[in-house]
Amino acid sequence: MKTSVLVTGSQFEISGAILLYRQNLDSVYGRQSNAFATIHAVSTDQQRPQIEAGRPMTEEDFASLVAQLAPKSRPQVEWQDHSVLAKGLGRMIWWTPPMKRAMFFSASKHNTRSFKGQAMCPVPGMVWQATGTSLYVYAFEGDGMPTQETPLFQAPLFNVWASGQVCHGNAVAPVDGKKGETREWEKFLFGSRFTHPNFTEKDRLILGEDPAVFWNKMIARPTKSFPTKKLVKVDLKVGDLLAPDFTARVSKMTAQGEF
């Protein structure tokens, strides 16, 4: 096995290896796939490369690898026009203006104030990020296309963690051939049933009001538009979603009573 390669006149020596592990599971929700990676140093034993013991690959490892491999002549994530703001690194980021959407609520044992009902309810402008396996959603103020400097707010919805990641529950994510279609992800969120807030911290989902009470009133008598004064600001701007270590950063955004 060769331990070096000549590229455009420069010689590169093998220094490490990444091993990918995958688990395919069949469930009532269809075929699901989980994967993780380990990163290893490579040594030479009698002029033969030998993979050393490894460790789990982290977001920081991934970001460092991308920074070294990505072409320097173009950005790692390219800003786009229209509803799709950016694509790259296996991610797609887009926005939707304030609008009314069909929302379906179901009672849950996790919250005694949860309820059953449905209505066309107003929602604020939203910024979405799909990674292929996960969906993150945030709110923003205004009705025009956000820029990279636009501040973000907690999406004021049930089934969304403090990090912005959507809890899948028994909802089925878009299949591989549809993961690049924004409407499929929007249908995935708003076509599912909102059962309960994913945390209990006060003033973290809806400012100044219990989330279950807020949405129960909204179902009974929807307002013309979402009251943006009820939005809770988070420490993110739209441009932060482009960072290679985005998921590592937002994983630290937690709330009391999160489950």
Image: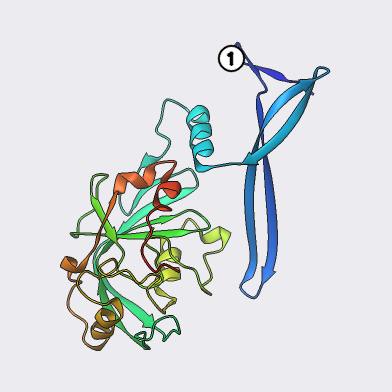
Above or below, comparing residue 173 to residue 236 in the picture = below
What residue did someone put label 1 on?
Answer: 8
Q: Position of residue 3 (x, y in %)?
A: 73, 20
150 relative to 110 in the view: left or right:
left
User: Judging from the image, what secondary structure is the residue with disc 1 in?
Assistant: loop
Residue 51 sits in quarter: top right
Q: Position of residue 120 (x, y in %)?
A: 29, 81
Three-letter code, disc 1: Thr
The outermost residue toward the front is 256
State the residue in front, 2 or 165.
165
Q: Quadrant of residue 226?
A: bottom left
Q: Residues within 10 Å of mark 1 (few under 14, many from 20)?
A: few
Residue at x 18% of width, y 66% of height: 228
253 or 61, which is in the foreground?
A: 253
Q: Which of the 4 image quadrants contains residue 184?
A: bottom left
Q: Residue at x 44, y 60 (%)?
A: 135
Percent position of residue 64, x then y: 50, 32
Q: Is residue 12 left or right of residue 233?
A: right
Q: How many marks?
A: 1
Q: Is residue 151 left or right of residue 107?
A: left
Q: Residue at x 53, y 33 (%)?
A: 65
> Viewer-proximal residue, 184 or 201?
201
Q: What is the quadrant of the N terminus in the image? A: top right
- Residue 102's place in the image compared with 63, above or below, is below
Residue 98 x/y as whole percent: 23, 66
